[in-house]
């Protein structure tokens, strides 16, 4: 039984789809004024794993990740670069898709662009205006009347009084209420023609929030099973989506809301001003793509994650342990054929398959799922070669361990097949030491550590187990 933590209810709930066997999932995508950064990678790798799991467990999933290709930031960036909006957004979309593919993300089932759904946005705005939930202000903008929508703030937990208390001193006097937000922006004479569309309220372009509401309805319907995104979207973006969509259609907009945790860099919020800002491309130039993906998957999707050199080193070492275990299935010099040519299917009936399923059905608990992989690696290191295919197959559910072991080990560690097989003996001793510690046989544990140290092997105990390096 799948359980999901619902941001709206603030608790973990049994997942019951609108339609048996089918899931409609919408995740807010990028505003494509620039290439994606590591915060985007953290969110979209998490939802890639979620979509994989839902499909693997038998659901017919319609996974939608939109693209915002018209926005104030896009207009400004295109002007600064002396290029058209279309040229900027197309170039950025190609870069985004390339970067996400490098991180092992499957393409979403649908990837609608905002500029393709202007008529649907105009229709929704007109509906809101007829229902007295929208009005045209003196500056030409069409705004949503927040106080006329009962229940505003239910997702974020913010009350209208709290929001008023947090208002800035300078407010937009063209609005009836400072809390109101824009649905349609009146065009400015200085803006390029490609950023303007005709509407009943004059030339202009859609506000950010209405874009997602209209695309959701057009592609998936008026009610979604799952709506997700990064932590910064809960308010105001998702709160405003609820107000627009439920205000227009009088039905629940989404039954389950999911939000990923934040990504920090060296314990601080990622920021260009702090000099700790990394694009995905910059990270890929420094680190192996699968190591970055493992780094994300090792944490629960709702937890905050700290990106640092030490964390990447730990992820590197953990992946090396798993790939070294896979490598033991091959004789020295055998090449990559056995694992490349065998179709490894998950055995859901053995203890490891059951534990893995239980972890993923518990709000997509990837840290617990990874623990199953390390237990399987231990089985392989103890000589149980039948565990190799299960290790590879379960790793594939998370988008990991799909390269031939020698390819990973050569690329990331520079080790030959023979060297990587030699490392298996080290991993076996580390496992024996772990078992000795669990049995409180500390003399045996210390003896194994000393033996390895004499061979130039330094052990480091961490949250994912013991890693090692050559001194």
Image: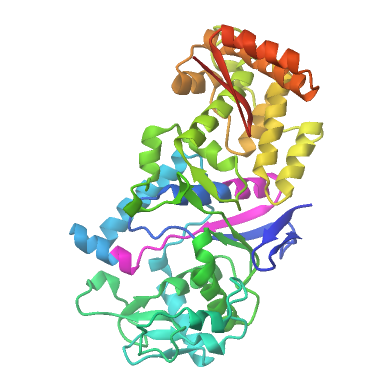
Question: Observer-nearest residue: 28 or 277?
Answer: 277
Give the side of residue 450 with respect to residue 274, left or right.
right
Question: Observer-nearest residue: 354 or 346?
Answer: 354
Residue 66 horizontal/vertical position (percent) = 47, 60
Residue 222, placed above or below residue 22? below
Residue 224 horizontal/vertical position (percent) = 63, 66
Whether residue 304 appears in magenta in the rendering, the answer is no
Question: Observer-nearest residue: 434 or 287?
Answer: 434
Q: Quadrant of residue 284?
A: top left
The residue at 73%/49% (across/down) is: 362
**Residue 208 visible in rendering:** yes
Give the side of residue 23 with respect to residue 456, left or right.
right
Q: Quadrant of residue 178?
A: bottom left
The residue at 55%/26% (across/down) is: 317
Residue 141, placed above or below residue 113? below
Whether residue 71 appears in magenta in the rendering, the answer is yes
Disc count in the image?
0
Say how the picture is coloured.
Answer: rainbow
Give the side of residue 210 with respect to residue 383, left or right.
left
Q: Looking at this rendering, what residue extends furthest in the left direction?
A: 82
Residue 258 horizontal/vertical position (percent) = 61, 60
The residue at 68%/46% (across/down) is: 365
Q: Quadrant of residue 448?
A: top right
Residue 191, placed above or below residue 106? below
Q: What stretch of residues is rendered in magenta? A: 48-74
**Residue 383 visible in rendering:** no
Give the side of residue 88 with respect to residue 434, left or right.
left
Question: Observer-nearest residue: 311 or 328?
Answer: 311
Residue 128 horizontal/vertical position (percent) = 51, 86
The residue at 39%/60% (across/down) is: 31
């Amino acid at each position: 039984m799948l359980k999901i933590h619902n941001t709206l209810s603030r608790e973990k709930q049994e997942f019951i789809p609108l339609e048996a066997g089918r899931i409609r999932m919408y995740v807010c995508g990028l505003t494509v004024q620039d290439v994606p950064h590591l915060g985007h990678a953290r969110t979209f790798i998490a939802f890639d794993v979620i979509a994989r799991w839902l499909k693997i467990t038998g659901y017919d999933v319609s996974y939608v990740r939109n693209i915002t290709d018209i926005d104030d930031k896009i207009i400004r960036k295109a002007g600064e670069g002396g290029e058209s909006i279309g040229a900027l957004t197309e170039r950025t979309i190609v870069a985004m898709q390339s970067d996400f593919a490098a991180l092992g993300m499957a393409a979403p089932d649908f990837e609608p662009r905002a500029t393709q759904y202007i008529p649907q946005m105009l229709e929704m705005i007109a509906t809101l205006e007829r229902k007295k939930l929208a009005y045209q202000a003196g500056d030409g903008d069409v705004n949503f009347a927040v106080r006329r929508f009962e229940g505003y703030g239910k997702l974020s937990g913010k009350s209208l009084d709290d929001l008023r208390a947090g208002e800035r001193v300078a407010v937009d006097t063209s609005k009836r209420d400072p809390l109101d937000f824009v649905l349609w922006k009146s065009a400015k004479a200085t803006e390029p023609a490609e950023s303007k569309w005709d509407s009943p309220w004059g030339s202009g372009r859609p506000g950010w929030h209405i874009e997602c509401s209209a695309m959701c309805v057009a592609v998936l319907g008026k009610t979604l099973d799952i709506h997700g995104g990064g932590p910064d979207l809960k308010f105001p973006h998702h709160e405003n989506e609820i107000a627009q969509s439920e205000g227009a259609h009088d039905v629940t907009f989404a039954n389950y809301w999911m939000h990923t945790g934040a990504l920090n860099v060296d314990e601080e919020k990622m920021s260009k001003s702090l000099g700790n800002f990394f694009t995905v491309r910059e990270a890929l130039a420094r680190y192996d793509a699968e190591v970055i993906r493992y780094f994300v998957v090792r944490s629960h999707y709702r937890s905050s994650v700290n990106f640092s050199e030490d964390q990447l080193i730990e992820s590197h070492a953990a992946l090396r342990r798993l790939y070294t275990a896979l490598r033991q299935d091959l004789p020295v010099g055998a090449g990559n054929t056995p694992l490349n040519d065998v179709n490894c299917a998950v055995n859901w009936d053995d203890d490891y398959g059951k534990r893995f399923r239980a972890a993923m059905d518990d709000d997509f608990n990837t840290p617990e799922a990874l623990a199953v992989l390390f237990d399987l690696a231990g089985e392989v290191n103890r000589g149980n070669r039948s565990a190799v295919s299960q290790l590879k197959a379960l790793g594939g559910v998370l988008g990991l361990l799909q390269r031939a072991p020698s390819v990973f080990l050569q690329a990331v560690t520079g080790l030959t097949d023979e060297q990587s097989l030699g490392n298996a003996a080290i991993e076996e001793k580390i496992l024996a030491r772990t078992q000795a510690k669990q049995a409180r046989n500390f003399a045996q544990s210390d003896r194994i550590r000393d033996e390895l140290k004499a061979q130039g092997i330094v052990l480091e105990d961490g949250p994912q187990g013991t890693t090692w390096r050559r001194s």
